Image: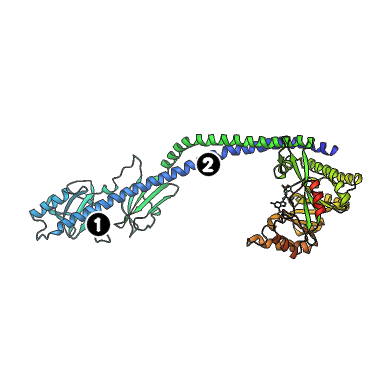
Amino acid sequence: MRYSMSIARDEVHVNRTGWIALASALGGAAIGAPVIAALHFSGRQSLNKEMDSALSIADEVIRRTNEVSHQSVSAINKLTATPAPDPCADEHIARMREVAIGSTHLRLVGRVEGTGLVCSSLGRHMPPVPLGPVEFVTAKGARIRTSVALPLAPGVRFIVAEISGYAAVIHGSTPMDVFLDNRDVSISLVSNNTGGTVLTRGVYASSWFRALPRGGAAKTFDGQYVIGQRRSEDIDVTAVAAIPVRYLDARSNELSMKVLPVGLLAGVSLAWAVSVLIQHQGSLAAILRTSLKREEFFLVYQPVIDLRTGKCIGAEALVRWRREDGSVLMPDVFIPVAESSRQIATLTATVIDLVERELPRLLAAYPDLLIGVNLGAIDLQNKLIVDRLALLFSRTAIQPHNLMLEATERALIDFDLSSSVIRDLRAMGLMMAIDDFGTGYSSLSYLTQLAVDCVKIDKSFVDTIGSEAATSKVVYYIIEMGKSLDLKMVAEGVETEAQATFLLENGVHYAQGFLYGRPMTGADLDDYLARH
Ligand SMILES: Nc1nc2c(ncn2[C@@H]2O[C@H](COP(=O)(O)O[C@H]3[C@@H](O)[C@H](n4cnc5c(=O)[nH]c(N)nc54)O[C@@H]3COP(=O)(O)O)[C@@H](O)[C@H]2O)c(=O)[nH]1
């Protein structure tokens, strides 16, 4: 009685502070995470939108550039279609006028001789209008000048494309004349051959340029500008549009204002769900405490078989919780709660009470029966378990050699504390087994220092027997380790004859699993023993 009461006081304190800390941490995370996610989402969305916007501006520049190029080529083709002995004759100038009027982008078309425009759709030019040097020649042979001043429009710069002695003249801003929504977006047309700018409006940094395949596009962000670019299919130029970062920030802030309430709402909902879950866990711990007092627990036993003889040598005691409504809860559900709420020692004490009540009857018929009892980590850190078992042996026919205490590798993690308890238990003649062997922290040195008697090979390794899984080799190493330390080995979760044969052939002598029997009541184990 003293045993469980001293633990109960501890539990109350640890639980309350533990739950409050856990609830605060999870509640904070539950609200914070969706809000951060919302802000991250709005940042990414804004960047994507701004990149799309930059690319659509570059697309429009390329569309207009292609259009201008096609109109120039087609106008000049019309002029060269019929040979003109005197290209500046009145009828040919009239023809130039017709061609210029028929085009939406061309300001004029004319005849070039040397570097001067000698006549055009406007008439004869005496003296010729100087066009200046050709800046570059396109792959199709067009000779391009990008900043030509014409006396008829002072202060305006024109682009002149010269092909076969004829010039198509367009306003210098035509390719860049795209809708920018009053934003100071920088636009450039860059030559793919030289990497230099053909036309620029605003600023341009050569680092923005990416060499692209014909018709290709790219979207980037250099920290200062969001950049979109498109290479023309037809001519050797790439349009680059660069939007300053301040527009991105403004878009992001605007979007944040819209998504933040959604994030907050999601956060609050999540926090509420977390609090319900925590309350449920908390309440399960509270119900468990009451149920331990009400003795709502019972044991089932799963047979352990000697593979060499097929005889049952004992069983593992497994606890079950029968609720008031008759439903039965499995240990996977309540053992973790018992451990986290520090009630596992009380539960172990209950299991030992049940063993004390049920085992003597079985031992009367089978005095060498070996029953495995599971311990939690806390049990191994406290000498109370040694006292409780000493009491059990003193007042029943149960002998130390009838019990094997099973502890998981995880339960041994505090080696200094657990090794001293294990030594005391072994000194009393009890056998110790490492449960779920291979899944946890055991090192060879732990196993030798603790001088355990038995390892229970975890079901996950038994499952791999006969499979091609990468882990299937591990079972060999585990068996070899057990053999080299001269430990008894019990394979857990044996479900097939093939597994049993493999285990026996490899020197594992004991097994438990559905192949031999599911966990059963004490009365059923009695019958089972009579048959095996
Ligand atoms: N500290 C304590 N832990 C306990 C106690 N009783 C049980 N447990 C631990 O709970 C875990 C789940 O146990 P349980 O639901 O009882 O499942 C056991 C077997 O039913 C199951 N098993 C056995 N053979 C097979 C099989 O062939 N196939 C299959 N699918 N399952 C099988 O394995 C469980 C036994 O595992 P182990 O203990 O590792 O041998 C479990 O971790 C229990 O240890 C308790 O009183 N105290």
Residue 335 lies left or right of residue 400; in this view the side is: left
Q: Residue 8, position in %: x, y?
A: 79, 36
Please give the residue where the numbered disc 1 appears in the rendered image: 144
Residue 267 visible in the shown view: yes
Determine which of the numbered discs, if any, sits on residue 27 in the image: none
| Nearer-N-terminus badge (1/2) | 2
Disc 2 within 8 angstroms of ligand 1 (CB): no
Q: Nearer the viewer, residue 284 or 398?
A: 398
Left or right of 447, for residue 206: left
Mark 1 to mark 2 CA distance (whole Å)? 51 Å
Q: Quadrant of residue 324?
A: top right
**Who is closer to the viewer here, 279 or 525?**
525
Q: Secondary structure at mark 2?
A: helix
Dot 1 falls on a residue whose secondary structure is strand
Q: Residue at x 64, y 37 (%)?
A: 277
10 Å crowding of disc 2: few (<14), some (14-19), many (20+): some
- Within 8 Å: ligand 1 and the Cβ of disc 1? no
Task: Tell me, yes or no, if residue 131 can be seen here.
Answer: no
Q: Residue at x 24, y 55 (%)?
A: 145
Q: Quadrant of the N terminus?
A: top right
Q: Nearer the viewer, mark 1 or mark 2?
A: 2
Q: Which residue is mark 2?
A: 37
Instruction: Please give the name of the residue rendered at 73% of the width and 60% of the height, measured from the top-left corner.
Output: 500
Q: Residue farthest to the right?
A: 394
For badge 2, the amino acid type reads Ala
Q: Quadrant of the C terminus?
A: bottom right
Image coordinates for residue 336, horizontal then vertical, percent: 71, 43
Rendered image coloring scheme: rainbow
**Amino acid type of the residue that numbered disc 1 sits on in the rendered structure:** Ile
Check if mark 1's residue and mark 2's residue have beta carbons within 8 Å: no
Question: Along the line of sight, which residue is nearer the eye, 28 or 355?
Answer: 355
